[in-house]
Structure formats: structure tokens, C-alpha cells
Image (spheres, grey):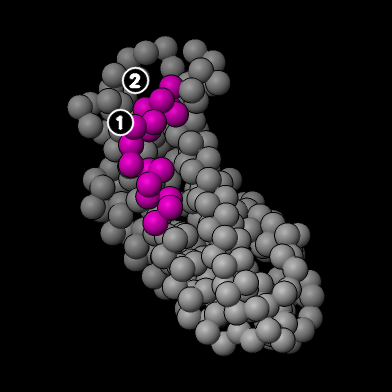
Amino acid sequence: MSFLELLKIEFMKVKRSKIIPLIFVAPLLVVASGIANLSSYFTPEYTNAWPAMFIQSALVYAYYLLPLSMVVVCVMIAGRETQHNGVLKMLALPVSRHALSLAKFCVLMFYLFMEMVVFLAVFIVAGWVATNTMGVTETLPVLYLLKWCAGLFLTMLPSVATMWAVTVLFEKPLLSVGLNLLLVIPGVLAANTPLWIVYPYCYSGYLVSCSLHEFTTNTSGIAFELFPFLPCAVLIFALVLTVAVTQFGKKEMR
């Protein structure tokens, strides 16, 4: 069985799950509340309304709601196999357990991408309503929004890989959810220490914090430095994904 065929099967497994409605919840909550709270301060002469709305919406979203929603998605994807001995049935087929774990992670990345698309779409609609209601004539900064949303997606990858590894290592849903929650909660504290670079759960939040710094100091492109972040993030991503791939189904194979 080729990897593409395996990937197609994995998407079919989650087709009727409740993941799609789930990825709408966090963006709707954070964007609606964030823009509603901020738009009351808008005046027709207000400048930089879109960056202000983005930071207001994305700060809590990046630190907490996005990681928490991905934790739930991890458990839901893994749960398709743990129910009714699904892992044993899949491993009885001529398919590599390593490829199976990697295919599931690809599905997880797809839903992360979809949630970012939903967040961007909801933000644009809500922001357009807010600016037009308050008479703000500022142009929609498409490149600005795409840049930061792409940054959120990329910086979430090491975190999502770590969440998947935790889900694989601790098969009981309550245990994996609880451990991931304990790792997500201190993210904002870790981001304010020099050790943030080795704590993937705070990467996306730290990126938005850098956006806030650039906005408040009126600078551009200096707050978030790619080195040594990028080598460290790639290394963490590779290590935890390797753990997830090699440990998936190992107990069932004994």
C-alpha cells in the first residue's frame, strides 16, 4: 500500500468526525470577542486598525486556543484507532506502522492549516464589519495578514509534533490531554524567559508577542530572529516526530 493510498484512508476515517466543527470554535470565539472589544475605540481617523485587531485577536489564540484545539484534534485522530482495536486491525494489513503514524500526522497538519484558513477568513469578515461600522477607511493589509498567519502555522508545527508524540506515548485520552494541557498553560511564562527557544508550546504565542512589539515600537522585522530559533525548532520537530513515528503501534506489535 502506497503512502498516498494510506493518506486517503486516514482522511476517510476522520471524514465523519466532529473535527471540522471544532476548528471553527476557537477562531470564532477569539475573533468575535477581540474585535468587538477593540472596535469600540475606533474613530474614523484611527490608523493601523487591522494590525491592532489582529494582535488583539491572535495573542490569546496563539498562546492557548489554537494549541488547545490541536490537542483535542490529536486525541480525536488517535481515537479512531484505539476504538474497537483499530490499531491491531490496521497493523494486520501490509502497512508499515511508521507510515501509518506519519499519515496521521499529515492529517493533523492539514487540520492545523484548515484552522488557520478559518481564522484568517473569520478575522477578515469581522474586521471588515468593524471598520465599516466605525467609519474606518483603512485598506485591508492582505500581505501583513498572510505573513503572520503563515508564521503562526509554521511555528505551530514543532508544537503539534510534540502533541502528537505525547498522544502516541500516552494512549489513554485523559492522560494525553492532561499532559498536553499542563504543557500548554505555562507557554506565556516560558515565552518571557531565555528558555523559550526550547519550549515549542510557546512558539506561536511568542511570534504574536513579537508582532505586538513591532506594532508598539513602530519597527519592522527585528523582534523575531530566525537564528538560533530555526535550527532549534527544526531539531525539536524532527526529534519528537521521530519518537511519534517509531513508537506508534509498538506495544501492539509485541
Quadrant hosting residue 193: bottom right
Amino acid type for the residue under numbered disc 2: Met
Residue 76, image x, y percentages: 33, 42
Seen from the viewer's position, the closer of residues 121 and 193 is 121
Q: Is residue 199 inside the magenta stretch? A: no
**Which segment is the magenta one?**
9-25
Q: Position of residue 73 (x, y in %)?
A: 38, 46
Can you say whether 171 is above or below 67 in the image? above
Image position of 86 (left or right of 116): left
Kind of residue at disc 1: Glu
Residue 201: x and y in percent read 49, 63
**Where is mark 1, residue-wise?**
81
Mark yes or no: residue 96 visible: no
Residue at 44 percent across and 73 percent down: it is 33
> In which quadrant of the rendered image does the C terminus lie?
top left
Dominant secondary structure of the residues highlighted in magenta in the image = helix
Q: Using the rendered view, name the quadrant where residue 144 is placed.
A: bottom right
- Residue position for label 2: 90
